[in-house]
Amino acid sequence: MAQSDYFPNIKKIEFEGAESDNPLAFTHYDENQVVAGKTMREHFRFAVAYWHSFCNENSDPFGTGTRSFPWDKSASAMENAKHRLDAAFEFFTKLGTPYYCFHDRDLAPEGSSIAESEKNLMEMVARAKTYQKETGVKLLWGTANLFTHPRYMNGAASNPDFNVICHAAAQVKAALDATVELGGENYVFWGGREGYMHLLNTDMKREMDHIGEFMRMARDYGRSIGFEGTFLIEPKPMEPTKHQYDYDAATVLGFLKEQGLENDFKLNLEANHITLAGHSFEHDVMLAAQNGMLGSIDANRGDNQNGWDTDYFPTNLYDTIHVMMILLEYGGIAPGGFNFDAKIRRNSTDPEDLFIAHIGGMDTFAHGLLIADDILSNSDYKELRDQRYSSFNSANGSKFENGNLTLENLRDLAEKNGEPDMISGKQEMFENLINRFIR
Ligand code: XLS
Ligand code: CA
Ligand code: CA
């Protein structure tokens, strides 16, 4: 397929180094640079989110869209979908992101029947497959949009009406077919309306059990058609519901265990959702990584002044340093990746702004990786942290960790050893250490 020309003024984005003042060049993301044994391309597996970048004209509850989509001008929804795909692959290849992610409805419009929706989707999948082959860009994950259509106003898999659950199943089945056909490496469930607006009219336990049953069905169907990737649940505490069942990483880990899904599912963690839940980005990343359940990351950022999902592009270096320190220690993100589930602001209206925003996100993570690696390789950070636990490395501390002491034993040891020494936590020293490496 011939490359489209929706971004005529943009050439392939190149790495120019930290001294560059070219806003359309990378300052830190050099895809071939090896850091801690892997190239940056392998570390991040960056993906573009189809919905924000190509479907969202930046309308808000107070005004219509401000972006102009030259690919969206035909009277036929399918024609527009094709042109949108052309624009998307032009963008991916000029930017140099190796992956993308989509919802079924981003790629193809809903038809007037289930059969027509399936046909639309598979037609677009065939076109996307050709592009993937030609460009080498791959699908990080697919998902089904189970929140936009009015039928999902009371939830999808958690809907109190069984008929709605059947429609959600039809969509997930088709989205899994599409993901497998395109070699998608993961499949995401984000339950935007799987929660409640009021507990008075809600049977929470019954709804959560329905979600569990629905996910077991999806897993079984996916495996039966050859999906070998990871299923991911993306936690979020609220919005659009008042309370969402997949509240945060800890809640989802408990849910997966209770439903017997922990061997097929991991977590897709979005920074802005984590901060909405009242944690720091790195908190949920650490929790998932330490439990072997870190699947993928939706890279974006909230705003301290706003209590909602702002989906800013990530530009906070301190966040990326911390998250990359965790990833370096716990084996990285593959087969997940870093998906920019982020949108340019409503007043960012130049076509180049979409490039600039992604470049900034990629550079901020690359810069964070370089600093994180420097800290882990050239400071005594890990020793200092481990030192705080040194009393568990021998004698009774080690017996305790191995389950070889009783509560009475501990009581007797307390009596024998007397009042513990005061041992400083050295928080300020740790914080200063990180800042010392930002140079
Ligand atoms: C919305 C979510 C959504 C998921 C995919 O808040 O971030 O975009 O990532 O359905
Ligand atoms: Ca997301
Ligand atoms: Ca979001």
Image (cartoon, rainbow, N blue to C red):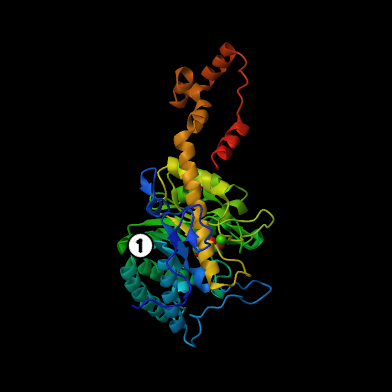
76 versus 342 height, above or below = below
Q: Horizontal and vertical percent for residue 36?
A: 39, 42
The structure residue drawn at horizontal position 56% and vertical position 35%, both measured from the top left corner, is 433
Left or right position of 256 against 307: left
**Residue 302 at x, y = what percent?**
61, 56
Q: Label 1 sits on what residue type?
A: Gly
Q: Quadrant of the C terminus?
A: top right
Residue at x 53% of width, y 72% of height: 351
Identify the residue at horizontal 54%, vertical 19% (top origin): 410
Quadrant of the snapshot with the N terminus? bottom left
* Residue 52 in view here: no
Position of residue 379 relative to residue 324, above or below, is above
* CA neighbours of label 1 inside 10 A, class few (<14), some (14 to 19), many (20+): many
Residue drawn 42% across and 79% down?
82
Q: Is residue 36 visible?
A: yes
Secondary structure of the residue carrying numbered label 1? helix
Q: Does the closest atom of ligand 1 sit within 8 Å of the Cβ of label 1? A: no
The residue labelled by disc 1 is: 222
Q: Of residues 218 and 77, which is closer to you in this image?
A: 77
Q: Quick one: 106 or 238, which is closer to the camera?
A: 106
Snapshot quadrant of residue 193: bottom right
User: 387 or 141: which is nearer to us?
Assistant: 387
